[in-house]
Image (tube, rainbow, N blue to C red):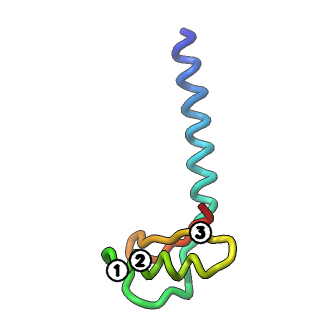
């Protein structure tokens, strides 16, 4: 019984961590160009790094998404 209780706690912690990561991402409205493939990923990353407080970027569903970590 104790094992099941620990699993529930771990799932709750993992669920909260995912929510925090998602809250730290936004789709860039100012990125211009095709956000496809490795060159698009690199351009998106460079674009996002120019914004203070945002440290990385990548293409997701052909949109440039910036993240704070």
Mark number for residue 39?
1
CA separation, marks 3 and 2? 13 Å
Q: Is residue 34 left or right of residue 17?
A: left
- SS category of the residue bearing label 2: helix
Q: Residue shown at 57%/11% (left/top)?
A: 2
Quadrant assignment for the C terminus: bottom right
Q: Position of residue 62 (x, y in %)?
A: 38, 76
Q: CA distance from mark 1 to mark 2?
A: 5 Å
Q: Residue 60: percent from the left, percent from the top?
A: 42, 69
- Residue under circle 3? 55
Question: x%, y% of residue 29?
Answer: 56, 84
Mark 1 and mark 2 residues within 8 Å of each other at the beta carbon: yes
For mark 2, what is the residue? 42
Label 3 and label 1: CA atoms lie apart by 18 Å
Taking the spot 54% from the left edge, 75% from the top edge, the residue there is 27
Which of the marked residues, 3 or 2, is nearer the chain's N terminus? 2
The quarter in which the N terminus is drawn is: top right
Q: Which is nearer the eye, 52 or 62?
A: 52
């Amino acid at each position: 019984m104790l094992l099941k209780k620990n699993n529930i706690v771990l799932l709750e912690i993992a669920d909260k961590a995912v929510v925090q990561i998602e809250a730290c991402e936004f789709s860039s409205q100012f990125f211009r160009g095709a956000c496809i493939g490795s060159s698009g990923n690199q351009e998106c990353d460079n674009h996002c790094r120019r914004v203070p407080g945002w440290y990385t970027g990548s293409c997701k569903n052909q949109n440039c998404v910036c993240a704070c970590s």
